[in-house]
Image: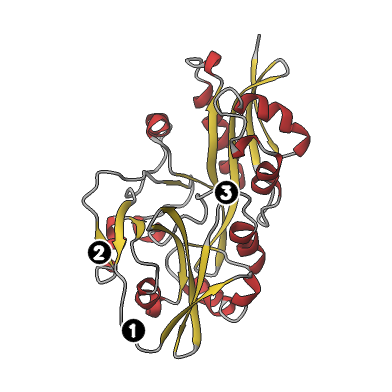
Amino acid sequence: MTIEVSIDDFNMSQFNHMAELFGSYFESNNKLLTRGYTEWLYAKNPFGLAKMVRAVEGDRWIGFMAMIPVQLAMHDANLLAYYIVNVLVHPQHQGKHIFARLITAAKELVKIENAVLMGHPNDMALKQWQRSHMYFHEPLRPNLVLPKLFCKGVNASDVQDARQLNSVLPVLQAQAKEANRLSVVITQAYISWRYFEHPANNYRLQLIEVDRVAVGFVITKKVRFGISLLVDQFMLDKHLSEGLGRLPWFTVSFKADSSTRELSKSLRLLPLKKQIPFFFTHYYLPFSKHDVMNLGLSASDF
């Protein structure tokens, strides 16, 4: 039977087909098999509906890849990107080059839309993405964030609602328009969806103030007892060090080495082998490691 590969906007009516495929890998209580998480990730994103890349044999889904839209800003311009998540091929159909066909379809779409493909592939998927000629930048490596015990005039307060960030969003948005590095476009709607409405993860957002003036915010989540992960930071550049210094003790940040060197007073590279590969591919515009080094995990920690 012929295997057809196509790309469509997400539609909740297709959930049962998706759940059947994901059920070939995951236990029934996995978040990927719940309607709430599926609808949140694929349908409620303020940047738009997710794209579903599907391999179908007859009426049965045998391969799937999700493309999550995210808007990036640099030099007073926005750039559409798609972050790749939840790629899998049914166990009975391994070895039929379905994964490669899914990637080819995604590449064709971003070429048409003048968009970016970005992702952090796991070890099993890495070689296929490399064979597909993705542009890999520096891998992200684990660093310990160094707390600043005494930082005069710097205060961090927990944020319970995205509206509490209204005072700082305009200045951060203005900085992004002038910046020579890419950053996620941040709006109240995006912050609410991404962090406060997540159906599975609990995030801690802290508003950073210097001399009672809001200068940015940082996002962490607990990954195990006593250890937090820095998911992202949106700070005025001149106050980034102060913001990182107010993070919870024993916070780990995954950064490229070039970023670690710039923040040498705030980060210490950990002696661990773990690293996260990172591809960021645009077929018409060149982007350097400098351009992408400020992108955190906002577009990936789903």
For residue 269, side relative to residue 5 (left or right): left
Residue type at mark 1: give it. Cys
User: Can residue 73 be seen in this snapshot?
Assistant: no
**Location of mark 1 (residue):** 151
**Location of mark 2 (residue):** 261
In the picture shown, does residue 12 fall above or below 74? above
- Residue plotted at (49% across, 89% down): 212
In the picture shown, does residue 149 fall above or below 220? below
Q: Residue furthest front?
A: 225
Badges 1 and 2: C-beta atoms under 8 Å apart?
Answer: no
Quarter holding residue 210: bottom left
- Label 1 sits on a secondary structure element that is loop
- Label 3 sits on a secondary structure element that is loop
- Residue plotted at (54% across, 77% down): 174
Distance, label 1 to label 2, CA atoms, is: 22 Å
Number of residues whose C-alpha sits closer than 10 Å to that of mark 1, classed few (under 14), some (14–19) or many (20 or more): few
Choose mark 3 or mark 1, whichever is in front.
1
Quarter holding residue 4: top right
Distance, label 2 to label 3, CA atoms, is: 32 Å
- Label 2 sits on a secondary structure element that is helix
Q: Position of residue 134 (x, y in %)?
A: 42, 39
- Residue plotted at (65% across, 55% down): 47
Distance, label 3 to label 1, CA atoms, is: 44 Å
Q: Position of residue 89 (x, y in %)?
A: 54, 23
43 or 160: which is nearer to us? 160
Number of residues whose C-alpha sits closer than 10 Å to that of mark 3, classed few (under 14), some (14–19) or many (20 or more): some
